[in-house]
Amino acid sequence: MKEYTVKGKPVRVYVCDSEDEIASQAADVVMYAIRRKPHLALGLATGSTPVPLYRKLAEKNRAGEISFAKVRTYNLDEYFPIDPASPLSFRGFMRDNLFSKIDLPEEAIHIPRGDAPDADAEAARYEAELDALGGVDIQILGIGSDGHIGFNEPADRFIYPTHATALTEQTRRDNARFFNALDEVPTHAITMGIGAIMRAKKCIFIATGKNKAPAVKSALLDDPSPACQASVLQFHPDTVFLLDRDAASLLP
Ligand code: PGA
């Protein structure tokens, strides 16, 4: 582990040799937490980065080492509009990569509805749900190459409530690999705001690959700024950064 001191505060960074090592480390933290609190509120992220973690959690569930029967999950975001039944929706992504492989009850899944009639009203509904919860116990976070967490895109301020947002061109290009063409990538989304992310008791931040290195460096070491939304985590009291060598390559 490396520990950086940023403005007098420790930032805990684990540089791992492989995606598999990151997945094992993160899975251990999640499983330990579920064993201590079976009804854990677990914040989840989509994208390629957490897939090895989800594979590991599903393996452990299949092997009987952990149960999700009492866990509640809260996803960071969802495209809008999108059919939740579509495999391209984040609900579909979660179903294919985790939910269909573990003993989590359907009613324990919380994700903004991509087919709600009104994005702002759906964002407010999700925010009320998160508010009632008072913060997830553990939040899994990836980072966009533009520094976003959830779909909190670079801006001139941090937006605290859950909200509807336009996606940056960079994010749409990054996510185009899941679609047939760039113009099929949704232009908007609903995302947990910075407030709900910061209310998480613990964050597990995962980043892999060279294309994340500039955003990771900015998030961890630059002055916190809404131009790199992940930099707000410098103020979070318990975030663990799990990086592969490529994502950590611009850190001193
Ligand atoms: P990725 O996405 O894991 O597919 O790179 C991360 C993110 O956009 O948060």
Image (cartoon, grey):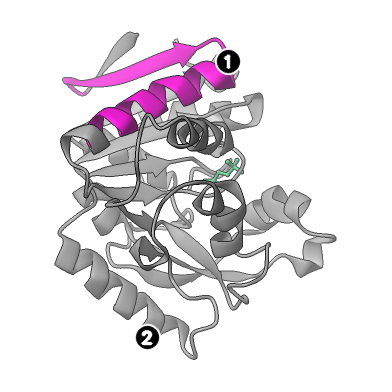
User: Residue 20 vs residue 73: left or right?
Assistant: right
Q: Quadrant of ligand 1?
A: top right
Tell me the residue that label 1 is attached to.
18
User: Which residue is pictured at 21% across the width and 50% down the height?
Assistant: 39
User: Which residue is pictured at 39% across the width and 15% down the height?
Assistant: 14
The C terminus lies in which quarter of the figure? top left
Q: Amino acid at mark 1?
A: Ser
- Residue 19 falls inside the magenta stretch: yes
Tell me the residue that label 2 is attached to.
121
Q: Is mark 1 within 8 Å of ligand 1?
A: no
129 w.r.t. 144: above or below = below
Which residue is most to the bottom?
117
Report, in whole angstroms, how far the alpha carbon at label 1 lies from the one at label 2.
41 Å
47 w.r.t. 105: above or below = above
User: Which residue is pictured at 48% across the width and 70% down the height?
Assistant: 165
Mark 1, residues whose alpha carbon is within 10 Å: few (<14), some, or many (≥20)?
A: some
User: Residue 111 vs residue 247: left or right?
Assistant: left
The stretch of residues the image draws in magenta is: 7-33
Q: Nearer the viewer, residue 164 or 200?
A: 200
Q: Amino acid at mark 2?
A: Ala
209 w.r.t. 158: above or below = above
Where does residue 75 sit, x and y in percent of width and height?
A: 41, 57
Q: Which of the 4 image quadrants contains residue 64?
A: top left
Where does residue 132 sit, x and y in percent of width and height?
A: 16, 68
Mark yes or no: residue 221 visible: no
Mark yes or no: residue 126 visible: yes
